[in-house]
């Protein structure tokens, strides 16, 4: 069977995934096809940037693909599926990365017996560092699951979760990088306000986040212990953490995850 993969929806998530896949060598550029609804300039940009193929015609995009990856907004899913439904066949695997939308809803929209995998990657895929969770619809076999895991493992880690957990996964891992970037933005602003050069602050923060990530990955210590290792009694870290607690940091973060999770549930209902 062909190795081709078609992206229906060529926005930021599709670009992160396809650039990661190309870097990993999992697929060659001639095996990747992309299509959009109407933004053909965007398709031309992707073609120039990654030498992949773009086709305006949906039938041509999906017919020969082994995997069809839907990367459109949840509210565009119905129209996107309607535009490709008739050109799919039961040997293909449909993977959706849309937040909130269940595999049953996707199958209903399809109205055909096509295997569906729902995945939640994040934009760190572009750097080969996505944390992706996948779950399978009722027609997807172990082999389909294996294919999806293999695909997403080329752009980071990939793990299977129960479908009911996908909303939580979306809140912490799909959206998660944005919260980290926001933290960096705010820390940078505070450092600049205190007189540090913007570039210096930026470089220090990038390495601080990367280093902390590496420690979480490789030290074998849990985050609470890593935090304690930095927190000298009466020192600067303790003072900083107390200020975070006064600002109700925990409450804000819990509310952030809960609200994002609820939004994922709402997106799935529309
Ligand atoms: N961004 C992220 O960090 C993550 C996003 N996701 C999920 O990925 C999906 C896409 O998000 P994102 O890439 O950010 O969104 P973007 O808005 O960047 O991209 C969406 C793309 O879908 C295209 N599109 C819309 N309708 C159709 C259609 N009927 N047929 C074909 N293409 C269509 C749009 O094309 P046009 O401009 O022509 O309308 C656009 O290029 C969402 O469902 C989101 O929940 C999941 C994990 C992380
Ligand atoms: O914000 C969103 O809805 C998407 C899903 C996860 C990350 N971005």
Image (cartoon, helix red, strand yellow):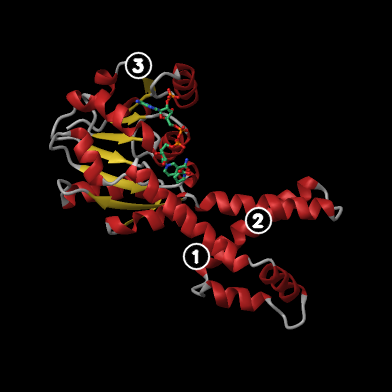
Residue 14 vs residue 81: left or right?
right
Residue at the location (22% across, 35% down)? 109
The relative height of residue 54 versus residue 193 in the rendered view (above or below) is above
Residue at the location (49% across, 50% down)? 175
Task: Calculate the distance from the C-alpha at mark 3 to the C-alpha at mark 1.
Answer: 42 Å
Do the residues under discs 3 and 1 have CB atoms within 8 angstroms?
Answer: no
Residue at the location (56% across, 75% down)? 224
Q: Percent from the top left, x then y, of residue 93?
A: 21, 38
N-terminal of the pair, mark 1 or mark 2, is 2
The relative height of residue 207 versus residue 62 in the rendered view (above or below) is below
N-terminal of the pair, mark 3 or mark 1, is 3
- Frontmost of labels 3 and 1 is 3
N-terminal of the pair, mark 3 or mark 2, is 3
Residue holding disc 2? 207
Residue 36 placement: quadrant: top left
Q: Percent from the top left, x then y, of residue 160?
A: 29, 57
Task: Calculate the distance from the C-alpha at mark 3 to the C-alpha at mark 2.
Answer: 42 Å
Find numbered disc 3 in the image and state the secondary structure of the residue it sits on: loop
Q: Nearer the viewer, residue 253 or 33?
A: 253
Residue 87 vs residue 13: left or right?
left
Badge 1, how many Cα within 10 Å: few under 14, some, many 20+?
Answer: few
Do the residues under discs 3 and 2 have CB atoms within 8 angstroms?
Answer: no
Mark 3 residue's CB less than 8 Å from ligand 1: no
Mark identifier at residue 56: 3
Badge 3, how many Cα within 10 Å: few under 14, some, many 20+?
Answer: some
Residue 89 placement: quadrant: top left
Task: Calculate the distance from the C-alpha at mark 1 to the C-alpha at mark 2.
Answer: 15 Å
Residue holding disc 1? 217
Q: Percent from the top left, x then y, of residue 14?
A: 41, 35
Residue at the location (73% across, 51% down)? 188
Q: Give the total of numbered labels.
A: 3
The relative height of residue 48 versus residue 13 in the rendered view (above or below) is above
């Amino acid at each position: 069977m062909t190795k081709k993969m078609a992206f229906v929806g060529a926005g930021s998530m599709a670009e992160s995934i396809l650039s990661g896949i190309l870097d990993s060598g999992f697929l060659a550029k001639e095996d990747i096809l992309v299509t959009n609804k109407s933004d053909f300039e965007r398709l031309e940009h992707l073609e120039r940037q990654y030498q992949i193929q773009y086709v305006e015609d949906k039938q041509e995009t999906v017919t020969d693909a082994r995997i069809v990856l839907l990367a459109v907004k949840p509210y565009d899913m119905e129209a996107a599926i309607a535009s490709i439904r008739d050109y799919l066949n039961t040997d293909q695997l449909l993977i959706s990365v849309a937040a909130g939308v269940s595999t049953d809803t996707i199958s209903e929209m399809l109205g055909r017996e096509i295997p569906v995998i729902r995945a939640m990657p994040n934009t760190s895929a572009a750097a080969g560092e996505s944390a992706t969770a996948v779950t399978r619809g009722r027609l997807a076999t172990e082999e389909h699951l294996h294919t999806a895991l293999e695909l997403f493992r080329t752009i980071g880690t990939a793990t299977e979760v129960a479908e009911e957990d996908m909303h939580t996964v979306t809140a912490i891992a799909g959206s998660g990088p944005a919260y980290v970037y926001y933290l960096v933005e705010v820390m940078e602003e505070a450092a600049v306000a205190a007189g540090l050069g913007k570039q210096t602050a930026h470089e220090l923060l990038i390495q601080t986040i990367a280093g902390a990530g590496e420690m979480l990955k490789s030290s074998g210590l849990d985050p609470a212990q890593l935090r304690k290792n930095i927190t000298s009694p009466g020192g600067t870290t303790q003072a900083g953490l107390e200020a975070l607690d006064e600002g109700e940091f925990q409450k804000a973060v819990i509310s952030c995850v809960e609200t994002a999770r609820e939004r994922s549930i709402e997106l799935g209902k529309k």
